[in-house]
Image (cartoon, grey):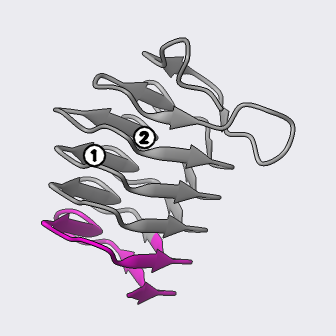
């Protein structure tokens, strides 16, 4: 479990999460890192809640080959590329109450599916610019 950890000014990722399963990352900060804030590679069924990610050189949250991770109330702003990127076979990842704005590229980009997005009035996601979310992935 990672709780209230601050990863700043690293020469690579703030948090590089590889082959992680069933862990909780709560109220962490990833800022001003030379690559991604959170880089998930083959991560399964982890919970990311209330983390703040900003001003990383690349992406805020980067998911590759990751399945069934739950993202709740995270913020990813002002990163050098995307706020959230879901790609390379990542699927079945629910996103609820997250926010991403003012990233250099899309605030949220999905290149693999299906993933799930809360879009109603209660706990909806706020992504200022979006690419790739498909119809039917909202709940």
- Identify which residue is drawn at 51% across, 87% down: 4
Q: Residue 78, can we see it?
A: no
Residue where numbered disc 1 is placed: 63
Report the mark closest to the observer, 1 or 2. Answer: 1
Question: What numbered label is drawn on residue 50?
Answer: none
Q: Is residue 46 above or below residue 139?
A: below
Q: Residue 17, can we see it?
A: yes
In the rendered structure, the answer to whether residue 18 lies left or right of residue 84 reads left
Q: Secondary structure at mark 2?
A: strand
Q: Alpha-carbon distance for marks 1 and 2?
A: 8 Å
Q: Position of residue 29 (x, y in %)?
A: 48, 73
Q: Looking at this rendering, what residue extends furthest in the top direction? A: 135
User: Crowdedness of circle 2 by 10 Å Cα count: few (<14), some, many (20+)?
Assistant: many
- Identify which residue is drawn at 29% across, 44% down: 58
Toward the viewer: 1 or 55?
A: 1
In the rendered structure, the answer to whether residue 100 lies left or right of residue 35 reads right
In the rendered structure, the answer to whether residue 22 lies left or right of residue 71 reads left
Q: Position of residue 16 (x, y in %)?
A: 20, 66
Residue segment shown in magenta: 1-29
In the rendered structure, the answer to whether residue 113 lies left or right of residue 49 reads left
Which quarter of the rendered picture does the C terminus lie within?
A: top right
Instruction: Give the quadrant of residue 27.
Output: bottom right
Which quarter of the rendered picture does the N terminus lie within?
A: bottom left
Marks 1,2: beta carbons within 8 A: yes
Residue where numbered disc 2 is placed: 84
Toward the viewer: 54 or 41?
A: 41
* Residue 55 belongs to the span the image colors magenta: no
């Amino acid at each position: 479990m990672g709780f209230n950890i601050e990863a700043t000014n690293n020469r690579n990722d703030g948090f590089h999460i590889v082959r992680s399963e069933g862990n909780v990352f709560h109220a962490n900060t990833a800022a001003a890192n030379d690559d991604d804030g959170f880089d998930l590679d083959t991560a399964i069924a982890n919970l990311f809640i209330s983390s703040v990610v900003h001003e990383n050189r690349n992406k805020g949250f980067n998911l590759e080959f990751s399945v069934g991770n739950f993202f709740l109330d995270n913020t990813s702003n002002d990163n050098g590329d995307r706020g959230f990127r879901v790609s390379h076979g990542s699927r079945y990842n629910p996103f609820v109450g997250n926010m991403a704005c003012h990233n250099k590229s899309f605030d949220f980009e999905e290149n693999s599916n299906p993933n799930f997005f809360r879009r109603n009035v209660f706990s909806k996601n706020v992504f200022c610019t979006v690419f790739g979310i498909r119809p039917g992935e909202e709940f």
